[in-house]
Amino acid sequence: MKKLEDYVRSIPDFPEKGIIFRDITSVLQDAEGFRLSIDELLKLLDGLDFDVIVGAESRGFIFGAPLAYELHKPFVLVRKKGKLPCETISQEYSLEYGTAQIEIHKDAIENGQKAVIVDDLIATGGTLEATAKLVERLGGKVAKIICLIELAGLNGRELLKDYDLASVIRYEGK
């Protein structure tokens, strides 16, 4: 039986020399790889008490929605600024060159709800931290943050040190 790591395609020198890009499209394109990714993420939630799953645009949707379906939990979208139709709150976060904003509907999280945040990858942690802040600003509590892949060399775990964080695959480099 293949391990999840066997489905992740590693592309050297992309987007620049010296970087190994960890491509999840090869996981998604293989039915067994995709099933294994969801099964492994489900294991990270085993025994956890929580109310809602939150996914950050866009790859958090890919992994968060099937988890919500399987666990019979609501699924909340966090999107880029200007993409949600109802009243929102926004959170700015840092990018390598500049800043960006993400938003959540004001009524997406109820006061006291415990949320699991899902994304495909933790790199620097900026998007996940901004998502956690949105959940907290609405009165929710972040029960756990889970990702398929962690790029440990980018130190995102340090930015998210106040949260319970887990990843399925951990790569030491960038």
Image (cartoon, helix red, strand yellow):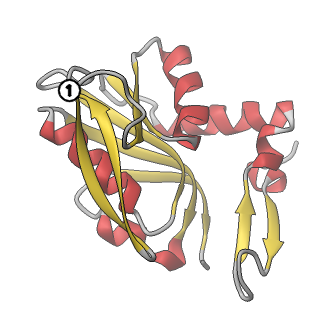
Total numbered circles: 1
Q: Residue furthest bottom?
A: 18
Left or right of 112, for residue 70: right
Query: Vertical placement of 148 versus 73: above or below?
Result: below
Residue 34, by quadrant, is top right
Badge 1 amino acid: Lys
Which quadrant would residue 38 be assigned to in this image? Answer: top right
Residue under the point 86% across and 37% down = 30
Q: Is residue 11 above or below residue 146?
A: below
Percent x, y of residue 103 = 31, 39
User: Residue sitting at 35 percent across and 46 percent down?
Assistant: 102
- According to the picture, the residue beneath numbered tag 1 turns out to be 106
Q: Quadrant of the C terminus?
A: bottom right
Point 36% across, 23% down: residue: 85
- Closer-to-camera residue (69/167): 69
* Nearer the observer, 11 or 80: 80
Q: Is residue 59 left or right of residue 104?
A: right
Badge 1 density bin: few <14, some 14–19, many ≥20, Cα 10 Å = some
- Residue 89 lies, in percent from the top left, at 21, 37
**Residue in view at x 72 percent, y 88 percent:** 18
